[in-house]
Image (cartoon, rainbow, N blue to C red):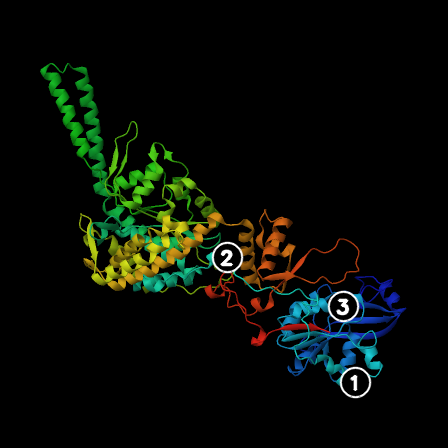
Amino acid sequence: MVHGPAAGDEGGARHNGEGDRQRSARATAATYGYADENGELLFECLRYEPKAFRQRRPDGRGGWIWNLTDARRVLYRLPELLRADVASPVFICEGEKDVDTASKLGLVATCNPMGAGKWRQVKDEAAKVLRGRDVVVIPDKDEAGRAHAAEVASALEGVAVSVVVREVPTGKDLTEWVQGGATANDVRGLADHDGSEPRAAAAGLVPEWPPLQPIDESATPVPFPVEAMPAWLASFVSALAETTQTPVDIGGTLTLAVVSACVGGRISVRVRGDYVEPAHTYTLAVAPPADRKSAVHRAVTAPLISWEKEQATARRAEAARSSAERNALEQRLRAAEKKAGALDPATAEGADALERARALAVELDRHAVVRPDRVWADDVTPQKLVGLLSEHGGRMALLSAEGGGLAGLVNGLYSEGVPVLDVLLKGHGGDSLRVDRQGRPPEIIETPALTIAVALQPDALAELLKRRDLRGRGLLARFCYVLPKSRVGMRRAGAPMRAEVRDDYHDGVRALLDRSTWCDELRIVSLSEPALAAWEELEREVEPRLGTGGDLEWMADWAGKVCGLVARLACQLHAAEHSGGSVPDIIAAPTMERAISLGRYYLAHAMSAFDMLGADPVRAGAARLIRHLERERPCEIDERAIKRWLRRGQDTPKNVHAECAMLVEYGYLRPAVSPAESRPGRKPGPRWQVRPFWTETAEEPGSVHSSILSTPVLHQARGQQARTVRL
């Protein structure tokens, strides 16, 4: 049975005019009211003789609107269905007449409005009502009825405890069977089965779900170990993540970068023998647009900004006096050089003028210009970065919320005579940096200590990782990578940060910046014996994994530096733990253990980052689609919904179909059963059903452990095996 327009009806006519006169010319055989949970009438379906159907809804003024444009679509006899014993089977018929027949027999029955092929209009409502119930689908014995039963069974598999499709033994529908003498017990018998009947999928009624498989294990985000940080840092990072509704990873790595900026070039750690690691690090955090990177960046760098302002104010007079003295020296030198050039050096006067010019040149070279202390920069050119390192004792940090500074640095091998990669490579390793440019004095930085922490969008990171020259020279292996799970789409109003938490963070950073904490010479601390033992145990664990056949062989360039990274992190944590006083000469074992936990976090994220190098675009698109499904949790999707979610120019129908085909193969989707359509015009596009017991039992969106990119969720409704069978 298919409900469609009655001959001569006007689709949008109200309760007056020609449409009413045409309807009144036909006899109304039955009126079926559809009500909400509270019994409030939503709309009616009218059956006419000769056979035709129309729908109408109240207009709120005592009349009718003859369409269902804005009406909520619900199941027929919804209030009775909700009041029924949940242990009773629910009979889903094709039309209201059969439902009324079953109800008169004392059975629980329902259907969707407008007959066969229209189940998708109520599939979401039905999933809520029929979850955990035993369902019997009774189709009309024709092609349209069987196709409708297949659609209903497909939609309810995994939602209901069981779904059984049964045709009546005699007659073309349930009503004719009952009129022929069938009793309530006969109808109830349709629900009896022992589970031995063939599954509908095996019979071709519903496509079978394949085993659910992880589509991209490398995309599993490992949670940032906030507990590894000193209390004053951990409290700030947790509060910042809450108030900005951002991943804790971004705030955590940026605050460690601030510590690196404060202590880099001032302290190093002697691991064993002559092996010494500096304390500064490089970090790349990946965050999509609208992820509030700038808000986190402002909060984290606030104490650096205020400290630099205070330094500029305190040293303004001294800097001005120093600049004036240098300008005067330069003028005197020019005058002396001019005079010496005009005289014969063989004469006594000429020799005195030349000696005077030489003395002024030496004095000018020794004159140090006083500049306010700076700790960090945002977007700088390579030559400016070298200048900042030279001016501030080899110590500088590049901290950027958008990654523009780093992108500008790596766009070429040279920039105005500055070897860009050499600056970045030596700035990380602390090797002597010498830059000679034509027409300028050489800049020599004996032990540069450069800190980098920038946030990039995923596409920018992918482009960076494709640069063979950057990986071949070892630059990419020097960065810590952070790929947090975005909270965009799942954010709420965050609680404001308490003032004492913010103040503790500012005080801690200022204590690390305080010159009295550090001596002029580089401070070198050592590892305690237990700390060294823990570090060497990590070294023994990692080394075999780097060799042929090891799980880290493919990224040995990065993983081979992870033990050194851990030593640097231990040095940072050690300094931060004692920010309020003198820093001990020995790093304790608990500090090393916390550094190792951070190292394992960065190793997991580096594996995800380097895996992007060989990423299959179809697999990447499928992984993005899974994240949308995880958040939206639909029962069914089509091509238009996918393109609306992703909004990417490359999502042609071919790409979308390839991505969905992969998700079908891995068990997340399956082709939806298309109902028989009698309407003219273009055929509807393909649709896919979303695996229901994944979407309904996954944990809260945003939970690391709920991500189906890693660990499939394979629970069934009520912990039972859902089944669909057909006789």
Q: Which residue matches tag 2?
A: 216
Q: CA distance from mark 2 to mark 1?
A: 54 Å
Drawn side of residue 495 relative to residue 709, left or right: left
Which quadrant is home to the N terminus?
bottom right
* N-term mark: 3 or 1: 3
**Which residue is at the front of the view, 411 or 470?**
470
At label 1, which amino acid type do we have? Answer: Thr
- Quadrant of the image occupied by residue 714: bottom right
Of the pair 78 and 160, the residue shown nearer to us: 160
Residue 258 placement (x, y as % from top left): 32, 53
Neighbour tally class for label 3: few under 14, some 14-19, many 20 plus, Cα within 10 Å? many
Image mark for residue 183: 1
Quarter occupied by the C terminus: bottom right
Which residue is under mark 3?
Answer: 146
Q: Crowding at label 1, few (<14), some or many (≥20) Cα neighbours within 10 Å? A: some
Q: Are marks 3 and 1 in contact (CB under 8 Å)?
A: no
Tell me how far mark 3 sits from mark 1, CA to CA: 23 Å
